[in-house]
Amino acid sequence: MTHEEIRPATTADVPAVKAVTDAAYHHYIERIGTVPQPMRADHAANVAEGKVFVTGEPVIGLVVIEAYEDHLYLDNIAVHPDAHGRGVGGRLLRFVEARARALRLPELRLHTHALMWENQKIYPKYGYEVVERRTDGPYDRVHYRKRLH
């Protein structure tokens, strides 16, 4: 596998999915005052349900996506800090968009914590627009969408 391929995660990838997610989000715990939702996810269940796609050997990045009737939801995108600056996140975002188009879904949706300001600089560069900001339990979230034409 080349470093650019993105493939469905397998059961053997679950430890790497957890490790990359934890590495990508751990530094936010102190900033937001709670464990980020992606770190609480049931990675094994998400992989078993076919929601997780990974890149790298070893895994350096991943997305967790879920198709709905009217949109594709990007539940998590994580890139290991050691791989930052290599275009991994951009490749993953383009993969998610291609997946939505292949499924003939008109829109992508995601959210990020309001205190994860780094993410809020990235998503608009890929055509996402803010829909709303709302609190869900302990999470102050900014919701985004990208309409596909």
Image: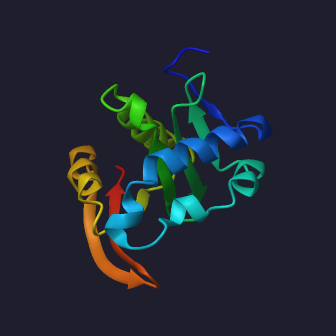
Q: Is residue 33 above or below residue 105?
A: below
Classify residue 2 as left or right of residue 127. right
Direction front: furthest residue: 30
What residue do we see at 53% from left, 50% from top? 22
Residue 19 place in picture, x, y as percent = 59, 43
Classify residue 56 as left or right of residue 118. right
Q: Is residue 112 visible?
A: no
Classify residue 43 as left or right of residue 27. right
What residue do we see at 25% from left, 52% from top? 118
Q: Quadrant of residue 140?
A: bottom left
Residue 9 place in picture, x, y as percent = 69, 38
Residue 37 place in picture, x, y as percent = 52, 66
Q: Camera-side residue: 1 or 34? A: 34
Q: Is residue 82 above or below residue 97?
A: above
What residue do we see at 35% from left, 70% from top? 32
Q: Quadrant of residue 110?
A: bottom left
Image quarter hosting the N terminus: top right
Classify residue 14 as left or right of residue 92. right
What residue do we see at 45% from left, 72% from top? 34
Residue 14 place in picture, x, y as percent = 71, 43
Q: Is residue 116 visible?
A: yes
